[in-house]
Amino acid sequence: MSPLRICHVGRTASNDPDWTVLERALELGFDTILAVDDGGGNGSVSAMAEACSVRGLSLFLDLDAYELDLAHPLVRQYPEKFSIRRHADPGIVVDPRHLPEAKGCARVQPDEDLEPLAAWWSDVVTRGADNGVTGFRIIKPGRLGKTFTRALIERAQHDVVFIADTPGETRDRVAALSEAGFDYCLSSLPWWDGRASWFAEETETLSRIAPVIAQVESPAKLPPVSSRQRCGRLAIAALSGSGLLMPIQFAEPA
């Protein structure tokens, strides 16, 4: 498969009618946009997909099936398939007559039968593709397991790209994805100190699954302040991956 140049731009909703974030990504030389669905329905996704299409850009979405909000419909329907983590709010006074909405997250339990969850997320993929989405980055696929991810990918009713976002997962979990059917994997370059041997070992492991896209920086991290460090990271990404993924803020002044 041809190398991808992916720019992560944040959420699909935009208060910018001129889509300057897309224009900026195009100016920087990217051919693909990666965004987070803001939950505003298919309208916001299709609007962004159309804006990408007229500029010759592809639109990918993040898909996090591993960690969900406690109010998510899958958690309510299949609570036994999740490990519930509640977050206490020490500053709130609880009135037993009006209990506050629970806060926290629910994480998939890999040992459970995840067939119903795979079917639900397959529908999400299909709806996204129907609205112009051409790829998905699957968060924590190793924790979801090979059976889940393979079912998700095989059920795709459109020709879409699937990227395994594996940084932070154990080597055994990552290696188990070799037959899941991913098109690309993401490297852990943002967490490499430039010396440790684990980066080469990770690249070797990921290469057995799919071509490796170099992640220039994590969208959840602040870019290095030094322009020299940023240029160095870009150079390593260009040399170590089959394509690259970069957050839009990495190109902005510190």
Image: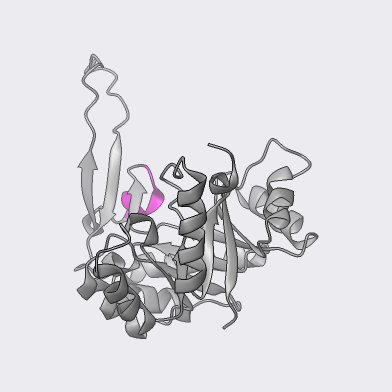
The reply, left or right, for residue 190 in relation to residue 163 is: left
Image coordinates for residue 53, horizontal then vertical, percent: 75, 62
Residue at image location 44% in from the left, 72% down from the top: 240
Q: Main secondary structure of the magenta part?
A: helix
**In the image, residue 189 above or below residue 159:** above
Q: Quadrant of residue 19?
A: top right
Q: Answer yes or no: is residue 11 visible.
A: no
Q: Is residue 55 left or right of residue 4?
A: right
Magenta region includes residue 76: yes
Give percent across and percent down for residue 80. Answer: 22, 56
Q: Is 250 located above or below residue 123 in the figure?
A: above
The answer to whether residue 90 is left or right of residue 42 is: left
Give the residue at the far front of this rendering: 228
Image quarter of the N terminus: bottom right
Q: Compare residues 213 and 131 and report the one nearer the observer.
A: 213
Report x, y in % for residue 242: 51, 76
> Can residue 135 be seen at all in this image of the molecule?
yes
Residue drawn at 69 percent across, 58 percent down: 49
Q: Which residues are magenta?
A: 71-77
